[in-house]
Amino acid sequence: MTAIVIIPARYNSARFPGKPLYPLRGMPVIQHVYENSKRARLADDVIVATDSETIFEKVLSFGGKAAMTDRKHQSGTDRVAEVARSTDYDIIVNVQGDEPLIRSEMIDDVISLLEDKKASIGTLTKKIEDPQEMRDPNVVKIVFDNEGFALYFSRAQIPFHATHSELRTPDYYKHIGIYSYRRDILLALAGMKQTGLERVEKLEQLRALENGMKIKIRETFFETYGVDTPEDIERVEKCLNTSL
């Protein structure tokens, strides 16, 4: 199977405009994402999908590949799908343009998940170690079955521990937002209307589950933090320095 990483990157983020261009240790955020993605063994190519000529030019300036996409897209998935339509790769990997800590091993993991013919989509999870994350609606929680297929994603604490008797406290897992798609699945998903659960939780992956798509999960032991606000920069820079 052939695979390409497509990195959606828009300029006009409500909470942090221009964040893909913000310098981290002398390189823009988007360059960290791009170069980490290029290190993936199972990805044949990497391209940035953007609606910004400034981001487009910046990617070209450091030797990367980029494609201009429609400014009207409502989500990164739609932006990735637009570029995917012009390719013939078997697997499309969506790596967010604000994830400078993404590891190449994580990309290889989601690609290899699609070796399971029952899987339409692959993604990652990590065991929650900080109790505050269980109650944080910005941390998406996930439950999955014995074969590693997602049952549900939620901003709420799932599973809910209904009794505190002799039962062991269950393990809780958070979703790491990197996806691999079979190309036809991605294009089909991008053409579907929002579903009820998706609108309630504000989680696109619920559209896939509500339409019967199977999302395969693999646990990762790597931590990653996105750059959503200017306040996130300090935490990400600390993580980058630690990894040196």
Image (cartoon, rainbow, N blue to C red):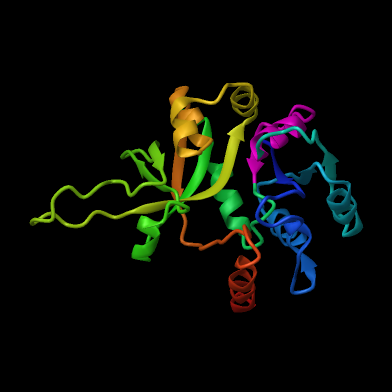
The spot of residue 167 in percent (x, y) is 12, 54
Residue at position x 52%, y 30% in the image: 120
Q: Is residue 60 left or right of residue 14?
A: right
Above or below: residue 128 compared with residue 108 = below
Compared to residue 211, the image places residue 55 above or below, namely below
* Rendered residue at 64%/43% (across/down): 94
Q: Is residue 58 left or right of residue 237?
A: right
Q: Position of residue 3 (x, y in %)?
A: 68, 39
Image quadrant containing the N terminus: top right
Vertical comparison of 212 with 147: above or below: above
Q: Looking at the image, which is closer to me, 186 or 228?
A: 228
- The verdict on residue 87 being magenta is yes
The answer to whether residue 30 shows anywhere in this view is no
Magenta span of residues:
76-94
Q: Quadrant of residue 234?
A: bottom right
Query: For residue 111, what is the image quadrant?
Result: top right
Pick the quarter of the image with the C terminus. Answer: bottom right
